[in-house]
Amino acid sequence: LFMVLATQNPIEQEGTYPLPEAQMDRFLIHTIIGYPDDNAELEIMRLNKRETSKSKNDQPLTSISPQVIFDARKEIDQVTISENMEKYIVDIVSATRYPKKYSEEIDNWIDYGASPRGSIAIDCACRTHAWMNGKDFVTPDNIRAIVHDCLRHRLILSYEANADGITPDHVLDEILQQVAVIA
């Protein structure tokens, strides 16, 4: 088992440097985590207090067996994705590469679209999303639920888009409105 998690603090940039696009593309997803709500923050405080107050005699945290992960991967591999859903994924990614086919506005916002790793990431993440929601097949909702996380770090926006405050999420919202699901 191997996993890399990286964090990026948008406030203090000293000592951190943005990764080159080719390295960012290697991350499966880029999730944005905002502030917790009040109840979650209360639970974080209490959890922290419990962890710091543990004595050496307390039970150590239990770890998950690697077999659980391997079994979950097998189950996710069994989640089916129809040809229409595969085409929907390809159409979304293609819209980031050839946005002029969909909208001149989107074309003005994107300098470089997603690489093939983008469609691979969406395929993997949407099957996982379906599995986590108890389904054994992928729907357009599963795809739309993970597109932003899979593509926001793979788009290189134009100078004009950045100057106008256009975000990758806004571009992806527009693409999702333009790209039709094939029935």
Image: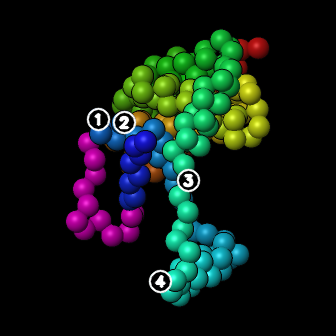
Residue at 58% in and 22% down: 89
Q: Quadrant of the C terminus?
A: top right
- The residue beneath circle 4 is 56
Circles 2 and 3 in contact, beta carbons < 8 Å: no
Extreme-top residue of the structure:
83
- The residue beneath circle 2 is 25
Element marked by disc 3: loop
Task: Report the span colored magenta.
Answer: 9-20
In the image shown, does 19 or 58 lie closer to the viewer? Answer: 58
Circles 1 and 3 in contact, beta carbons < 8 Å: no
- The reply to whether residue 107 is visible in this rendering is no
Element marked by disc 1: helix
Q: Residue 39: horizontal and vertical position, in percent? A: 70, 75
Alpha carbon of mark 2 to alpha carbon of mark 3: how far? 29 Å
Q: Is residue 178 left or right of residue 98?
A: right
- The residue beneath circle 1 is 22
Q: Earlier in the sequence, mark 1 or mark 4?
A: 1
Q: Earlier in the sequence, mark 4 or mark 3?
A: 4
> What number is the disc on residue 64?
3
Give amino acid for label 1.
Ala
Q: Is residue 60 left or right of residue 142?
A: left
In the image shown, does 110 or 126 lie closer to the viewer? Answer: 126
Alpha carbon of mark 4 to alpha carbon of mark 2: how far? 42 Å
Q: Picture quarter containing residue 80?
A: top right
Element marked by disc 2: loop
Residue at 34% in and 41% down: 24
Mark nearer the viewer, 2 or 3: 3
Alpha carbon of mark 1 to alpha carbon of mark 4: how far? 45 Å
